Amino acid sequence: MRREPIGSVSSLSSPVRPTAARHSVTREERHNAQLAAVVAASDDAIISLGTDFVVQTWNAGAERMFGYGEAEARGHKLSELIIPDADKDESAATLAAVLNGETVLKELLRRHKDGHLVPVEISTSPIRDRSGRVIGTSVIYRDISERERAKDTRRALADSEARFRVTFENARVGIVNVAPDGRFVRVNEAACRFVGYSADELTTTSFLDIIHPDDLAASVARLEQVRQGKIDHSDVTDKRFLHKDGTIVWGRVTGSCVRKSSDGSIDYFVAVVEDITARKHAEEELRKSEERFRSSVLLSPLPTLLYDDREQILALSRSWLEGSSYSGEELRRIEDWTARAYGERSGEVLEYIRRIISTEPQAQLAEMTIRTKDGRERLWTFACSALGTQSDGRRLSCSLSCRPSPARPRHGSLKTLSGALMSASGRSQPIKTCSSGTSGRESMSMSWCAPSSHILPTLSGLASRSTAQGCT
């Protein structure tokens, strides 16, 4: 029987039983091919180094992560490619530990080809041969940039919340969060002090329970407008609240609402409340004081005129109206008075009064002839002074008048007003006066005396003394 040589076609086509060695090689090749495919497809950077720490393999993930191609990286040490200068000593120690058989897992920074740093998680382990001898190092880098950004975001959010809590709790104005049904959700210390309740007490009650009954309807109507989406915030309003001790306190309230991003419904209201109780009390006292002063002007037996820097006449005493025969309806502004009382000299007198308003002198005495409504001419002595600023910002001025009588002739009336003003101011020197010349035309020069703060408290006394001494 003829035998064909091994390697011929017939021999290759004949069934030959494979050896165990060939099976083993085939399985190993298949296994290695699978590993190579996994390495190539991985998003992680997978690098193998020799015992000299020189790059032997560099997968596509490493190229994407660090910018170097495999051809650029092979033959170079990692320290020449991606290790920041500050980390080179630590990296060398890590690789040396791996060569001693250790596995290392940590988070650190590696340098991209363009210079920027990439936050990574590194896993290193030794590569061994069949005998167990360490022949290199496997290095796997995972890009944790997104994880770090998420950590930074959480850290920033935590810092923001901490700052908000500090601001919320330490604000000098009351800050409250209110649920859509009016219940307090969160209150700060200033809000608690404002109404006298503790935080626990307030969070078990409603915002509407502590609003003064007279202000409740407007507050409810405003909240309903917000609920309906007509407005997203309420105007700044002054409201009265009921303090725990039963007193009424005033707050200046600014409110807005926070809506849910999911459906736009109201999540909660935010209200800032400034305690303006002291201011309201002061304004009320000032209003009463101004009313008392206005009444004293109206009832003063000494002709008295009160006006502001807008040249509006605020008050006229009955004695002024009776002495000039004009009515209050006819004298609404300073120009109304000068036009009627001074005729062709009204412009000159009006400018004189305007200088008093604009320069705010302390006080001035002058004699002027006025014309009454019925055509009579009368010589009046005037004391004019700026009084200061009232609650609405207007600057006030006042003119007092005295006309000679048989009991007190012309120079006596000047002396009377001068003496009264000296008494009010505490001055010891005579006040210069402006008197009419021989032609009957009054001098318009100015002479200053007492501060107006001395005149206001003594207005009634001045009027009484002047009347008693013959000024009518």
Image (spheres, rainbow, N blue to C red):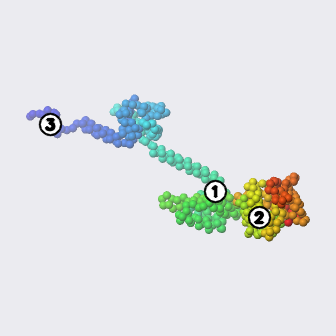
Q: Name the amino acid, label 3.
A: Val
Sequence-wise, which precedes: disc 1 or disc 2?
1
Q: Is residue 259 visible?
A: yes
Q: Name the amino acid, label 1.
A: Gly
Name which residue lies at 42% across and 31% down.
80
Please indicate whether residue 343 sits to the left or right of residue 428 in the image: left
Name which residue lies at 45% across and 31% down.
92
Q: Which mark is residue 418?
A: none
Q: Residue 174 carries which label?
A: 1
Discs 3/2, front:
2
Name which residue lies at 45% across and 43% down.
145
* Residue 151 point in image, percent of width and height: 49, 46
The quarter of the image holding the C terminus is bottom right
Name which residue lies at 72% across and 59% down.
309
Task: Please tell me whether mark 1 sits on a helix, a strand or a loop.
Answer: strand
| Residue 165 against residue 218 in the figure, above or below | above
Residue wearing tag 2: 343
Residue wearing tag 3: 9
Please indicate whether residue 31 sits to the left or right of residue 257 in the image: left
Q: How far apart are marks 1 and 2 (CA)?
A: 60 Å
Discs 1/3, front:
1
Which of the 4 image quarters holds residue 185?
bottom right
* Residue 433 point in image, percent of width and height: 84, 56
Q: Name the amino acid, label 2.
A: Gly
- Hey, which residue is sitting farthest right in the picture? 407
| Residue 123 against residue 234 in the figure, above or below | above
